[in-house]
Amino acid sequence: MSDYRVGILGATGAVGQKFIRLLEGHPWFNITSLGASSRSAGKTYREAANWIEATAMPESVSGLTVKECEPGQFPDVDFVFSGLDSSVAGKVERAFAEAGIPVISNAKNFRTDPTVPLLIPEVNPDHIDLIKSQSFTEDGSGWIITNPNCVAVPLTTSLKPLFDEYGVESVILTSMQAISGAGYPGVPSLDILGNVVPLISDEEPKIHAEPLKLLGNLEDGKLTHADFPVQATATRVPVINGHMLAVTVGLKKKPGSAEEVKELYRNWKSPIADLDLPSAPEYPIFYHDDERYPQPRMHADAEKGMRTSVGRMRSSNVLDLSYVAMAHNTVRGAAGGAILNAELLVRKKYL
Amino acid sequence: MSDYRVGILGATGAVGQKFIRLLEGHPWFNITSLGASSRSAGKTYREAANWIEATAMPESVSGLTVKECEPGQFPDVDFVFSGLDSSVAGKVERAFAEAGIPVISNAKNFRTDPTVPLLIPEVNPDHIDLIKSQSFTEDGSGWIITNPNCVAVPLTTSLKPLFDEYGVESVILTSMQAISGAGYPGVPSLDILGNVVPLISDEEPKIHAEPLKLLGNLEDGKLTHADFPVQATATRVPVINGHMLAVTVGLKKKPGSAEEVKELYRNWKSPIADLDLPSAPEYPIFYHDDERYPQPRMHADAEKGMRTSVGRMRSSNVLDLSYVAMAHNTVRGAAGGAILNAELLVRKKYL
Amino acid sequence: MSDYRVGILGATGAVGQKFIRLLEGHPWFNITSLGASSRSAGKTYREAANWIEATAMPESVSGLTVKECEPGQFPDVDFVFSGLDSSVAGKVERAFAEAGIPVISNAKNFRTDPTVPLLIPEVNPDHIDLIKSQSFTEDGSGWIITNPNCVAVPLTTSLKPLFDEYGVESVILTSMQAISGAGYPGVPSLDILGNVVPLISDEEPKIHAEPLKLLGNLEDGKLTHADFPVQATATRVPVINGHMLAVTVGLKKKPGSAEEVKELYRNWKSPIADLDLPSAPEYPIFYHDDERYPQPRMHADAEKGMRTSVGRMRSSNVLDLSYVAMAHNTVRGAAGGAILNAELLVRKKYL
Amino acid sequence: MSDYRVGILGATGAVGQKFIRLLEGHPWFNITSLGASSRSAGKTYREAANWIEATAMPESVSGLTVKECEPGQFPDVDFVFSGLDSSVAGKVERAFAEAGIPVISNAKNFRTDPTVPLLIPEVNPDHIDLIKSQSFTEDGSGWIITNPNCVAVPLTTSLKPLFDEYGVESVILTSMQAISGAGYPGVPSLDILGNVVPLISDEEPKIHAEPLKLLGNLEDGKLTHADFPVQATATRVPVINGHMLAVTVGLKKKPGSAEEVKELYRNWKSPIADLDLPSAPEYPIFYHDDERYPQPRMHADAEKGMRTSVGRMRSSNVLDLSYVAMAHNTVRGAAGGAILNAELLVRKKYL
């Protein structure tokens, strides 16, 4: 399985760099092609990228020549990861899919397309079969799969055991989001140092909608979304990595106690636990008994950033339960999630 | 009115220092006595206090000799402000009241006493009449009045127009609280730099209970608390001053639109607007039309820290309305609030 | 003296906004014209500016129509403050001067011009006479004066008493500079949160050169620069306002002790102390006896940001003395310094 | 070599916890005993320690019973690491040495003892022979070795190539030190958030003295210290890990150019490069060509925190060279340095 040739679209951006760093030494996937804007095309990656990751640029990519993001430039890849900005992702990703190149995308453009899976492997692995209903190519060789918004990931992952056990009626949350979520240069330091900004443009609609698709039911090739209201206040806080959520949730069936719910989390088994995927964490959900936890600076990097940490589960005075959840926004909530998606697709023979 | 002789209990602590700074140049109140622990007693204030305010220690207090917090040491004061820690406030404040010295307290100890007003002048000024039901002294000369928890202040102030116009059914909020709320030395920097801590011990019960007393109804000398559930998640963020709240509220009557509610805030008139109190802000509630606002670093100091800033009012998918509110936690939410309480008591002839 | 009509060039930028905020309520200077780029011209200031100051935009300017930065658009001003970016300041400022409009500039472009005073009123007030040697106009009506780099201000101010008393032979310093010095959007938060950046492009040459001009000797209309080497390492730290300097200095004459030098600072009298300028601080140099001070967050705003704070004076193992100095970089080190320059020019009848 | 039984003194403190985390999975050293204060003695480590490391407490220690720091309690260890506070380290470490138990100490108490090596393996590995001159025991079985102050480590390491090649005449530096250097709870957040504190008590004398011992010459069992003046200004900045130094140095011989010095660093070979010590970094000194580097948040963790990063080498206007250096203060500058010391002692048959 170690011979997948992989392209990265948007390779010079923050998400593209994260793909490159996370794929360094990956047992299955080898980066063989890099795509970026025409401004970078023709340069080596070393020249083209303003490398912002803390670890050194991998030597395996630093000498690669950056190409334009056109399918014809990527004749030899098995699939591509897309870290493209949403302003261009729609058109480019479609072109790759139509050219028969599978696209594992982190962009939002196709997330709401009814034939495109929005995927968290531990939440809705069966949704990958939606791929069969895509029509980018006649022979099905080209398709698109997406991963969710970086808040939707820990939100939906932490809701999943409740959704299955009790049913979810409503969700209210405040997100306290890390600055890395805005890319680079992203948030001006004058805006956020010693401050909280109570607005992240265009973020809340995604948080409201994506959990419903992720928790939807796929039957006979048709996806029926889950149906409950979500209300989010998305704020920015001076944290490097790790989005923290304070969640209150209303349930259809009532748990006997908060302790019962903690046990549910502790005993929860991921549906992909037995697939042995290289990037899958041992604990996709980790429940912290220490009420001071989770904290982004302490726990965002746990299990290489692929874990959703949960804590402070308690009965709520309004609705039913309150808790906090946290995950690394640019790993679990972006590039790392996309890589895990690709690994699942390999195991399921889509790749 | 400029001749009130005022004592400060807990003068060397963070709250005591804030009292001293805010009272510098006050038109009515002159600090004449300072009380602290026996460790400080006998020293000049200059020697006893590790002054942490950014402005210089006022010369009017730096040479005063610190006394122990015993009523007999304060023969010449008209009243005292108490910035005592709750571990000692209960006993000391009672002793002062029983000695006939009015106590304007920032401590939590008497907040739940049914005869002690918990006061925000713009919210429940009529509650001061509860003082008459106190029995610390036979002649009524000694009494206690308290101001609320630093989150309860912006929460209840921002709920007040909604409570009066529509009725409140339920409240869910996340507080993002500044480090100054923990006093000095308070929060270790290793805990909070680039981090969010999702727990503030003993904070949430106060946030759940105090708004109900503040919005209660005083009739025939008896206070009936308001009756709606409040659910808070209190978190600490790396901000110096200003507690930010993300609030979602359920109402009894439904507003026609979010715009209608904004107008309600814009046109709201404080019940003490005409009393011309020296520390009263022109806008006890200020509604920000810019959705990026309020922000603690930008707006906590507005109107000398006495304003509650509100923004992002919108219809909610769950319950009815969502908005954010913010106020300076150690001014409006502590010492400044207590000073405004004292000013109201002067105008109402209790002092 | 209260009738000066003042224009602001670069009014929508960070420095321009600071000029506007600092001039609100100024007893002599009234802003009557605002200039910015052609993109902003024609709009009201309220529409054109992304206001980033913490206090509200003054009503006196919010309705003014922004003009292009051409002298013909400013027929009725007595002089202009320039907060222009250096990429355009050279050309624009020259045009204004040649049109007979005095320019009080914060830009670097003319700082090294031998006929243009580089001015700190408390350091080299006599240098304003250099204006007479300028030839922008035949009748001398148009001229330019500049204020120094934001590090050069506290550096040179703190060196001034040493320079006069002992003579300076060499200076080594590290600057720890606040993010506001980079303007807005300026420093990306991902670069600076929890970090130190050991390079500020193009900053060190200014720190090396400007003190020599500021401490130069003007005789017979000719300015002879001071002559000693300065070596700076300019770093960026996560501080909002206030540049901190750690300075080691070699002297020609040796002080008897560090205590003697502290006394020199404590007793130092500003050459403009008797001119009663509205923006002049009482202590242009304030010596902190507490060795933990000065600190930017505690002391940058002292005396409305116009003070240079000095502390930790001690004998050095290498060279002669070591100390720290700090000043508010966008007030004393930029717009506030320029306003004080203008006030001096008024008193000296240049305006 | 994998069978060393190791004790940790001061196991519950910040340094002790760092020892435990860094030794997890160490190929040679197994923690078998933990010592702490009498308050902790008798509890399991899990109960006794307020674990502040980001990774989970290793299971291999969590169940160990904490002992008092008395040699009699440690009968079965081959040596101990001491992370004791200096207030008790002197007495305790002496007792262990006198009981025949080697002490690898991070405390300052014995650093100035003429018979105790102050060791950086890449700088002065030969100094370990000083151990032979110690007289804690008659048979030489008990001895003490120390690692330097956390600033002295990157300072001396970065000076070493210059010292050997050119000779050092004088050093001036400013340190910008991370908060983790003060332990836990350490620096109050109100002191350091958005701030710089220009004083770290008792830090500068160590920075002045320790490089001279480290660069000293051991001949015939007698250590002659190097002889040049060092002048430091030690400041605290809001950084989690990584002390940054801005250094200017005077040399005896003059380098031809800054480029020549960069080559010296790039080609420098560590004297222990061939010993294959488990914790030794590949690049004990890493020279960054990018002038924006090193930065603490980006590079403190490079090579597991064991590297000294150097950059911005340039000719200086005063003295000869200026550069910046940075290292992880609690790894390279504390526990990690001590572990490397122990590894060298193993290779050199002292253990």
Image (spheres, coloured by chain):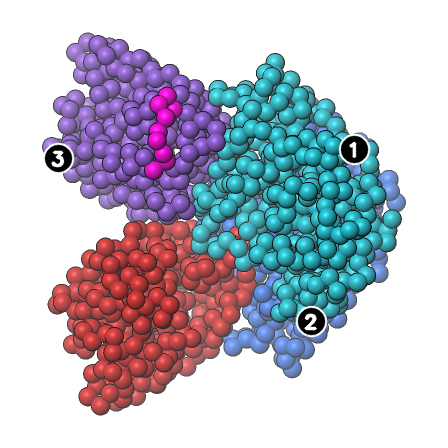
Chain colours: A blue, B red, C purple, D cyan
x and y, in percent, of residue D68 in the image:
68, 66
Can you identify the residue that label 3 sits on? Answer: C2
In the image, which is nearer the foreground, mark 1 or mark 3? 1
Q: Earlier in the sequence, mark 1 or mark 2?
A: 2
The chain to which mark 2 is attached is D
Picture layout, residue D68 above or below residue C221:
below
Picture layout, residue B255 above or below residue A199:
below
Instruction: Identify which residue is drawn at 78% across, 49% down.
Output: D140
- Horizontal side of B300 relative to A321 (left or right) equals left
Name which quarter of the figure residue C250 lies in: top left
Can you identify the residue that label 1 sits on? Answer: D273
Q: Amino acid at mark 1?
A: Ala
x and y, in percent, of residue C326 in the image:
37, 38
Q: Which mark is residue C50?
A: none
In the image, which is nearer the foreground, mark 2 or mark 3? 2
Q: Are marks 2 and 3 on the same chain?
A: no
Instruction: Identify which residue is drawn at 21% across, 66% down.
Output: B32
Query: In the rendered structure, which segment of residues is drawn in magenta?
Result: C251-259
- Horizontal side of C104 relative to A138 (left or right) equals left
Classify 10 Å Cα crowding around label 2: few (below 14), some (14-19), many (20 and above): some
Residue toward you, C34 or D102 = D102
Residue toward you, D27 or A94 = D27
Can you identify the residue that label 2 sits on? Answer: D43
Q: Amino acid at mark 2?
A: Lys
Q: Amino acid at mark 3?
A: Ser
Classify 10 Å Cα crowding around label 3: few (below 14), some (14-19), many (20 and above): few
User: Whole-Å distance between the Cαs marked 1 and 3?
Assistant: 74 Å
User: Whole-Å distance between the Cαs marked 1 and 2?
Assistant: 42 Å
